[in-house]
Amino acid sequence: MGEQDATPENMTMMQGFEWYVPADQKHWKRLADHVPQLKAWGIDNIWVPPGCKSSSKEGNGYDIYDLYDIGEFDQKGAVGTKWGTREELEQLCKVANDAGVGIYWDAVLNHRFGADHKEKCQAVEVDAEDRNQVVSDQYEIDAWVGFDFPGRKGAHSKQKLHWYHFSGVDYNAANKKQAIYKIVGEKSDGQWAEVGDVDDEKGNYDYLMGSDLDYDHPEVQADVLAWGSWIAQALPLKGMRFDAIKHFSADFLQRFPRGHEPLPGPHGREVLAL
């Protein structure tokens, strides 16, 4: 940097939530009320919690149920999320943008919780400390992997999820056994994502928790890419933080920002992916 060059502007981001925020569905309102003061204190950006529908109305969003429900549909015990309704979220985004404060979304794309029904599928058990080590013969399990999103009724996305959209689960309802199960069968190749595409901790860290999405499946890829474009149109976001990135496809993440090219409509803009 030359002597005459201006000093680059520093930006300050605040994490706009913590784990024990009350589950009163008022957090979007609280944040909106505090935006003017936060701006006066020098806050330029707010990292908001995962705002997609959780497996329960108390869920923080990391136990994600439905990407396409941001507090709009009566699912999992409430219309709103733990944080509030879609309308309140939109109002927070408007207040923040009017004040010159950017909103960064916390995107949980690795897994799902709160399946609507069980499905039978073939699986093998693997060692919890070395996921490459198979410790059982292949057998049929009854897994919570059926996602129909009945409260949404196909709005925003028609995609439903079945056993072949997932690579692993941690519970077999048939015998009530908890273990790490790698799903195999007709429409699943029975393999974790390759090391390098996911982290090599525990041999292969594709599986983290819940029902683990298989990013080798083209329908999973297409639906999540479509969600990226949808959320960028639905909300005036400045950027995104991706949760659990060591556990799902790095190759897919390289492609994901393409869904965030400038879009038509009032919120058309590029969205920064973190």
Image (cartoon, rainbow, N blue to C red):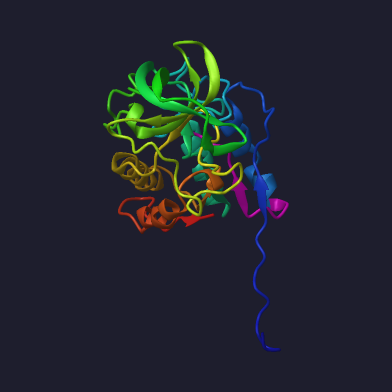
Left or right: where does residue 220 sit relative to residue 2? left
Q: Nearer the viewer, residue 75 or 131?
A: 131
Q: Is residue 47 magenta?
A: yes
Q: Is residue 69 visible?
A: no
* 52 over 42 or under it: above or below: above
Q: Residue sitting at 33 percent across and 24 percent down?
A: 152
Q: Is residue 268 magenta?
A: no
In the rendered image, which quarter is residue 270 located in? bottom left
Q: Residue sitting at 55 percent across and 35 percent down?
A: 208
Q: Position of residue 175 (x, y in %)?
A: 48, 10
Q: Position of residue 145 (x, y in %)?
A: 39, 23
Q: Position of residue 215 (x, y in %)?
A: 39, 43
Q: Position of residue 71 (x, y in %)?
A: 45, 28
Q: Is residue 110 visible?
A: yes
Q: Which residues are magenta?
A: 40-52
Q: Nearer the viewer, residue 244 or 153?
A: 244
Quarter holding the N terminus is bottom right
Main SS of the magenta part reads loop
Q: Nearer the viewer, residue 29 or 174?
A: 174
Quarter holding the C terminus is bottom right
